[in-house]
Amino acid sequence: MEIGSYEAKTHLPKLLARVAKGERITITKRGKVIAELVPPGGVNLDARRKLIDDLHQLGETMRARGVRITREEIVAWKNEGRR
């Protein structure tokens, strides 16, 4: 979620409650990212497990459609996102 700094200040208690449940919130000022609210220790475990399950399901769907993606392609995509 992305929110402006004024709105973040106004709704901080509600935002902190969402972060406590595992959500990450990006705070912007005039369109530029100035801060992120993140849960301690990163993503909550339930969210991480759901993401892993979703990725496994995506892989099964792709295989069923005959699409093959190599490990090298995945690593290249990951590294491309870090530039």
Image (cartoon, grey):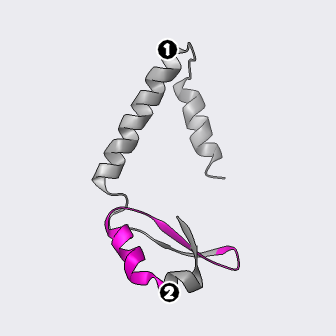
The amino acid at mark 1 is Ala
Residue placed under numbered mark 1 in the picture: 64
Say left or right for 49 vs 4.
left
Q: Earlier in the sequence, mark 1 or mark 2?
A: 2
**In the image, is residue 26 part of the stretch drawn in magenta?**
yes
Q: How packed is label 2: few (under 14 Cα within 10 Å), some, or many (20 or more)?
A: few
Q: Residue furthest right?
A: 30
Q: Secondary structure at mark 1?
A: helix
- The reply to whether discs 1 and 2 touch (Cβ–Cβ < 8 Å) is no
- Considering only vertical position in the picture, is 2 above or below 4? above
Q: Nearer the viewer, residue 23 or 52?
A: 23
The answer, for residue 39, to whether it is visible in the render is no
- Considering only vertical position in the picture, is 60 above or below 25? above
Residue at horizontal 41%, vertical 62%?
23
User: In which image quadrant can residue 26 be found?
Assistant: bottom right
Q: CA distance from mark 1 to mark 2?
A: 48 Å
Residue 16 location in percent, x, y?
A: 37, 76
The answer, for residue 59, to whether it is visible in the render is yes
Residue 38 location in percent, x, y?
A: 41, 68
The amino acid at mark 2 is Lys
Q: Which residues are magenta?
A: 10-32
Q: How many marks?
A: 2
User: In which image quadrant can residue 50 be found?
Assistant: top left
Residue 55 location in percent, x, y?
A: 44, 34
Q: Residue furthest left?
A: 45
Q: Nearer the viewer, residue 35 or 5?
A: 5
Residue at horizontal 37%, vertical 68%?
18
- Considering only vertical position in the picture, is 7 above or below 20? below
Residue at horizontal 34%, vertical 73%?
17
Q: How packed is label 1: few (under 14 Cα within 10 Å), some, or many (20 or more)?
A: few
Residue placed under numbered mark 2 in the picture: 9
Say left or right for 40 vs 58.
left
